[in-house]
Image: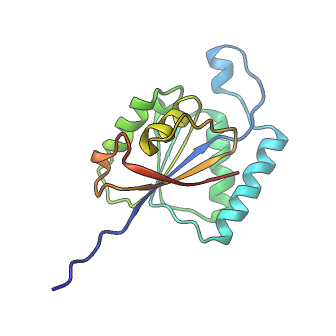
Amino acid sequence: MFLKMAEPKILYVLRHGEARPGIGIKGDFLRELTVDGRQQLKRLAEYLKSIDFKTDLILVSPAKRTQQSLEILTTTLAIKNNQITHDEIFDAEPQTLLDIINNINQPSNNILLVGHNPGISSLVSFVSGQNYISMKPGMMAVLEILVDDWRSLGANTGVLKEILQ
């Protein structure tokens, strides 16, 4: 008798691309990508396309720069799957991000989270058990998740496979 191994889970964590400065919370929320930010995301998207990147679910902040970052990726990669905009991702603490992922109630082996620092850097560090990893704009962390269910995602439950930029 052979047991079927569960397909590995992958969590992709993307920090939005470089953005223009903003003043105050409203200004921060409406910040747009710079020309360099757009270019770096286009390069990342082309690389992801070359390795046949796939995701089952996208979790994204409603902020303008994260939406623009995701638009560049989805256009290049022709991704047309589930996308959920969570207001809570904007300016989120790592525990909030973890709670959002823990509460996913649909079958998803590959999740893309598009968010902001310092929350996403802290999340990557926490899940991978690494010292603080500082995600620069346009960086994507690739984490192989070592638990079968997203509800079990927590400290030291993932392996940092690579950082893309």
Quarter of the view holding residue 107? bottom left
Quarter of the view holding residue 45? bottom right
Foreground of the two, 118 or 60: 118
Q: Going 71% across and 41% down the picture, which residue do you hit?
A: 17
| Residue positioned most to the front | 131
Above or below — where is 147 with respect to 6? above
Above or below — where is 104 with respect to 47? above
In screen coordinates, is 20 left or right of 2? right
Q: Going 28% across and 46% down the picture, which residue do you hit?
A: 151
Q: Position of residue 137 (x, y in %)?
A: 70, 39
| Residue positioned most to the top | 24
In screen coordinates, is 160 left or right of 2? right
* Colouring rule applied to residues: rainbow
Q: Position of residue 57 (x, y in %)?
A: 45, 55
Tell me the quarter of the image containing the N terminus. bottom left
In screen coordinates, is 74 left or right of 85? right
| Residue positioned most to the left | 1
| Residue positioned most to the bottom | 1
Q: Position of residue 78 (x, y in %)?
A: 62, 65
Q: Going 84% across and 42% down the picture, which residue do you hit?
A: 35
Q: Position of residue 43 (x, y in %)?
A: 76, 57
Quarter of the view holding residue 110? bottom left
Q: Going 72% across and 15% down the picture, which residue do you hit?
A: 23
* Picture mark count: 0
